[in-house]
Image (spheres, rainbow, N blue to C red):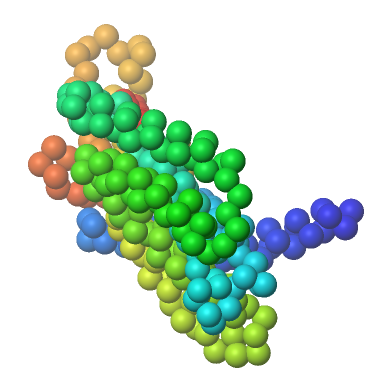
């Protein structure tokens, strides 16, 4: 019962935090279309906030895994191995998230040379990590020699992917920024002066949520909780199954929806809102990836 109460307390604390972050994510996204959303009862805020908190948690845990009070100090020579290891794990996190943004028909299928280079780099990375796993570094220099090469190699691989899809590059920068912010903050938690720094952290999270909504949210498929547009067909016919006449279907991209309306984009890239109550029938033609 005690464990259940702890989980319940965590949910109670995280829910309003996720809701607020989701508000800034959604409105950051809608600024791309000169819209805004201020309906406080919109549960999309909560769902989107949970998506962002998941990313924040992964980045924080990646750093925290490497953090040890006895290894972190004002002397960079002592703390650098832990920082480097954190950067290494953050790169792995980016590497794991890349498939979320990849499409089936990518540039690599049409470019055999680039495909072979990537396969070679990945093979080298796997071999190196397998070799490094048997090494037992004894000092800072050996840690650098073991940890730095795979970071460079992963950065090169991520760079190749970002040339095909720029959002991968933005994801890379975002994860590293989150990691750096966590490294700078984690040692101050519990300090008497930390309350003074909380305001800066709150502003940082709000700005990050807004930018996340503007640049990442539109690229994340809906099956992952993102806002990638999907296609919809509208008709003025109340029933498609039993109507024998030729039916005209107008297709649009749904860039956003709430409980009462769709925000649609036509083929001319014009964006407008449509009340759901005014639509007789609609069909989802192609969900986002």
Residue 97's x, y, as percent? 43, 43
Task: Give left or right: position of 169 versus 136.
Answer: left
Q: Nearer the viewer, residue 207 or 233?
A: 207
Q: Nearer the viewer, residue 22 or 283?
A: 22
Toward which corner of the image does residue 24 lie, by quadrant?
Answer: bottom left
- At x 54%, y 82%, the residue is 74
- At x 52%, y 57%, the residue is 143
Task: Give left or right: position of 249 versus 241.
Answer: left
In the rendered view, tell whether residue 65 sits above or below residue 205: above
- At x 35%, y 51%, the residue is 152
Residue 259's x, y, as percent? 44, 48
Residue 243's x, y, as percent? 30, 13
User: Which residue lies most toward the right here?
Assistant: 1
Quarter of the picture containing the C terminus is top left
In the rendered view, tell whether residue 233 sits above or below residue 83: above
Question: Is residue 275 visible in the rendered structure shown here?
Answer: no
Toward which corner of the image does residue 186 lie, by quadrant?
Answer: bottom right
Q: Nearer the viewer, residue 255 or 122?
A: 122
Task: Give left or right: position of 209 versus 138.
Answer: left
- At x 30%, y 26%, the residue is 104
Task: Give left or right: position of 62 versus 272.
Answer: right
Residue 68's x, y, as percent? 65, 67
């Amino acid at each position: 019962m005690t464990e259940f109460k702890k989980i319940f307390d965590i949910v109670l604390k995280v829910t309003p935090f996720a809701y607020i972050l989701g508000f800034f994510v959604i409105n950051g996204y809608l600024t791309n279309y000169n819209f805004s959303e201020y309906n406080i009862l919109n549960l999309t805020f909560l769902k989107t906030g949970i998506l962002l908190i998941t990313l924040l948690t992964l980045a924080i845990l990646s750093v925290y895994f490497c953090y040890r009070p006895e290894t972190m100090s004002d002397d960079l020579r002592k703390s650098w191995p832990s920082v480097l290891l954190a950067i290494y794990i953050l790169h792995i996190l980016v590497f794991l998230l890349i498939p979320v943004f990849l499409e089936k028909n990518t540039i690599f299928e049409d470019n055999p040379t680039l495909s072979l280079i990537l396969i070679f780099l990945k093979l080298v990375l796997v071999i190196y990590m397998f070799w490094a796993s048997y090494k037992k570094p004894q000092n800072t220099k050996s840690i650098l020699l073991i940890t730095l090469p795979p970071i460079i190699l992963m950065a090169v691989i991520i760079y190749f992917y970002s040339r095909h899809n720029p959002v991968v590059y933005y994801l890379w920068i975002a994860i590293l920024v989150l990691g750096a912010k966590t490294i700078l903050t984690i040692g101050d938690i519990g300090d008497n002066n930390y309350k003074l720094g909380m305001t800066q952290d709150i502003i940082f999270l709000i700005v990050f949520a807004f930018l996340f909504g503007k640049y990442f949210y539109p690229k994340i498929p809906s099956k992952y909780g993102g806002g990638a547009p999907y296609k919809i067909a509208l008709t003025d016919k109340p029933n498609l199954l039993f109507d024998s006449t030729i039916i005209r279907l107008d297709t649009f991209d749904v860039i956003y929806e709430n409980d009462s309306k769709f925000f649609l984009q036509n083929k001319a890239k014009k964006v407008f809102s449509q009340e759901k109550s005014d639509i007789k029938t609609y069909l989802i033609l192609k969900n986002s990836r």
